[in-house]
Amino acid sequence: MSSKIMLPKPNNETCLGRLLKERRSVRSYKESSLTLQELSSLLWFTYGCVEPDCERRTSPSAGATYPFEIYVSVRNNGVEGVEPGIYHYDAERNELVEVLKGDFSRQLAKACMGQRWVLNAPINIILVAVAERTTGYYGERGWRYIFNEAGHIGQNIYLASVEMGLGTVAVGAFNDDQVSKLLSLPEGYEPVYVFPVGRVK
């Protein structure tokens, strides 16, 4: 019979412990805008550059290949001072680059199998993988590392949302082709995850 070791009570009365205990999936959001400062902070927590040359980010990556690009769908009045549209997050320059003008939350929700929290959230963060960056180095096994990294980034979004008084939920049920077309993604860019984010109702 194998032996057992009784562990001491975990020291979880810390900042990280609080975030982990409060982390949950939130599907209902208030009808209120985020500030541009909140969006900037959230995106940095998600996949921002820790060093000026962006060789290290807030999420671990196999071989520092960093295969993900971050897109943001902003609905009408989703972010103060930001026009509705689809944006690409340029982490190195800390900029939002407009991809498409207009509120595409309804089309995105439809592509996500009609999930209403995608429609109602002021913003949706979309993780898009450029697989060649990782598979070009690791071969087919690179896909495993890409999905691992998606999980790391997703946890960043969850914990950052808790810290900022926001809520989110990971959405993996969507039509890949519809999301790719909506975002006008180039060939080789694959949507992996969608995260609606808003103030907790």
Image (cartoon, helix red, strand yellow):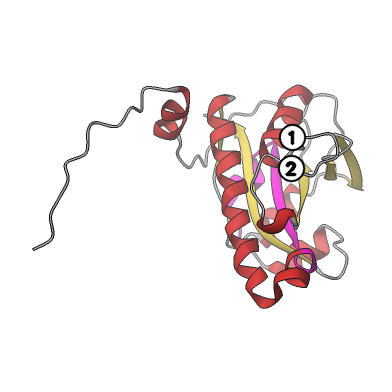
Counting from the top left corner in percent of width and height, residue 188 is at: 82, 70
Horizontal placement of 35 versus 15: left or right? right
From what the image shows, is residue 136 above or below residue 97?
A: below
From what the image shows, is residue 191 above or below residue 152?
A: below
Residue 132 highlighted magenta (yes or no): yes
Q: Circle 2 is placed at which residue position?
A: 56
Q: Which residues are drawn in magenta? A: 113-133
Foreground of the two, 109 or 171: 171
Q: Are marks 1 and 2 in contact (CB under 8 Å)?
A: yes
Counting from the top left corner in percent of width and height, residue 25 is at: 48, 42
Q: Label 2 is placed on what type of residue?
A: Arg
Residue pictured at 79% horizontal, 24% vertical:
80
Pointer 1 or 2: first along the chain? 1
Residue pictured at 59% horizontal, 40% vertical:
156
Quarter of the rendering containing residue 198: top right
- Disc 2 element: loop
Q: Circle 1 is placed at which residue position?
A: 50
Q: CA distance from mark 1 to mark 2?
A: 6 Å
Question: Which quarter of the rendering shows the N terminus?
Answer: bottom left
Residue 89 highlighted magenta (yes or no): no
Counting from the top left corner in percent of width and height, residue 43 is at: 72, 36
Q: Label 1 is placed on what type of residue?
A: Val
